[in-house]
Amino acid sequence: MTSSPPPGEPGPEPVEARGISLRRILAFDDGGALRLLLGPAEADVPVHGVVFGDSGGQEAGSGGPGSRDAEGQVVLAVGPPVSAPEAAAAVREAARRGACAVVLRDTEGAPAAPEVLAAARASGLALLVRAQGTDWADTASLLRSALARSGARGGTGDELPPPGDGLGALAAAIAASTGGSITIEDTSFRVLAHSATLPEADGVRRSTILGGRVPEERIAELRRSGILRALWTSREVIRRPASEDGPERLIVAVRNGPEVLGSIWAASDGRSLSPLAAEALRRSADAAAPHLIRHRLRESGAARRRDEALRGLLHGHGDGPTHAWSLGLSPDTPCAVVIAESAGAADAPAVRRSLDVLALRAASYRAGTSVLREAGRLLVLLPVPSGHSREALGLARELAAPAPVPGGVPVRAGAGPVVASVLLAASSHEEAALVVRVLRKRERRGEGGDGARYAGPAEAGSGPDVLRILDAVRPLWESGSGPVHELVRADLATGGVLVRTLDAYFDAAGDVTRAAELMVVHPNTLRYRLRRVRERFGVDLDDPDTRLLATLAVRLCDEAGGP
């Protein structure tokens, strides 16, 4: 039990009075009880408390006409569901009372009413819905717990809750055992904990700690030097010798089995590292793993929301500005999408290991980069500053470099065009997917060699346009019939020799000798096969329409993986 302060003396400032960022509140919800439908008008907003919409001001202050008794509060609008047009009145009332967000009841399978969405947009409120199976008491408890726990950690901060005092104490202990200045970072190079900064600390350490993240130019330098690749793929302590721009550093990855959780950096700021520093750092990585696992678990709600927002932007689903808000991006941020996938046959563990490393590499390429794992491939949303239109191709080239881990798999990577806004990311994603298909086709045909595993729209040439045409034509082809259809169906059932012959013949523009060279057969053999096409199936390649239909047919077969 707690006692009240004596009369006339102020009590401790309530948690709600200090304000916690809405992103941090949402990150606390890792069970999916709340779903963000529309982001607020501001980049982020402080939340000061929770109030029920039908409470009449009893929890938040005195209500009444013109009263803003819910200032900075999340209003739980008990009443019509988000699918009901009349719920718009609850949104407008919450805005009138000064709320920063409103929560409505969800209905399974029913979309939000346009009137409700319009009211939320007009008011600038964040609009959330309460999941099916969660009652209002649970929702209020969740939000108040998030306020209390986040507030206890102090400040409004960013959306990621700090890992706690345990990791800070560990950083201090590592500093004592190694004789160096320590930072513990996650895989995006955000600082989770650090030891005391000495007066002799170099500029990189100071800017890293002040900014909460390793500066972008330093990450780029580490990437170019190969240190990042070594860090993500090795279990050894890596030594970075002293140079003009900084002292000697020792680095080790923190792992949970094969999964990389983060890294520990020890810098010899104004003093020499201990002779046993490397061994101490290696042991410290094991000790840090449970802390970073807990940190990652605390992030799970935020990570799930980021994935959902990124998937929505890339596939053009849902409300784009809200997705951008969830990712911490301005809607008018120029961006490009890069897609990377394994090239060639490989077992699933090898593909997973390679993509794990490449995901780390992509996430560190530029601040604000978001990476989504989807069906054995990586989808990367890359913010592109003005004047850096080739940056997406540079990332594709880096991802398609030789296998990132020993025993890993080669990767092909396609870059989409730069678009003026993240709200247009779906079009860049569509183009990147077409570029990857072009690369896949070239590899299947043996064109370009290992150096052609990455491309952008310019390098892909007319390939993406051809694929668009084939995608549009396929339903018409599949519903048709006739001699060409019969030829393709019968030949594929017996190995597809004639389809491959026609493919080579069309590639050679009707030159029998060149087509025979492509197939590595005698020209007379190829002529015999062409006669079989005419005599057995009645397909006359001298007829322009028949030749066009046959060309589309073999291209469709090739795009499907070949006979």
Image (cartoon, grey):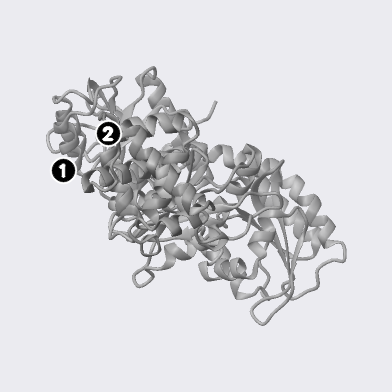
Residue pointed to by mark 2: 475
Give the foreground label among 1 and 2.
2
Q: Nearer the viewer, residue 339 or 102?
A: 339
Mark toward the start of the polypeptide (1 vs 2): 1
In the image, taking residue 286 as reference, residue 345 lies left or right, namely left
Q: Is residue 277 above or below residue 101?
A: below
- SS class of the residue under badge 1? helix
Neighbor class of circle 1 (other Cα within 10 Å; few <14, some 14-19, many 20+) is: few
Q: In the rendered image, which quarter is residue 82 located in?
A: top left
In the image, taking residue 60 as reference, residue 19 lies left or right, namely right
Residue pointed to by mark 1: 122
Residue 537, image x and y in percent? 33, 33
Q: Nearer the viewer, residue 22 or 220?
A: 220
Q: Is residue 96 visible?
A: yes
In the image, taking residue 512 as reference, residue 293 lies left or right, namely right
Q: How many marks?
A: 2
Residue 464, image x and y in percent? 34, 53
Neighbor class of circle 2 (other Cα within 10 Å; few <14, some 14-19, many 20+) is: few
The CA span between labels 1 and 2 is 43 Å
Quadrant into which the N terminus falls: top right
Q: Residue at x 69, y 60 (%)?
A: 230
- SS class of the residue under badge 2? helix
Residue 553, image x and y in percent? 33, 40
Q: Is residue 213 visible?
A: no
Extreme residue toward the left, this view: 65
Looking at the rendered structure, the kind of residue marked 2 is: Pro
Looking at the rendered structure, the kind of residue marked 1 is: Ala
Q: Are marks 1 and 2 in contact (CB under 8 Å)?
A: no
Q: Residue at x 45, y 50 (%)?
A: 441
Residue 88, image x and y in percent? 16, 30
Disc number placed over residue 328 in the picture, else none: none
Extreme residue toward the right, this view: 275
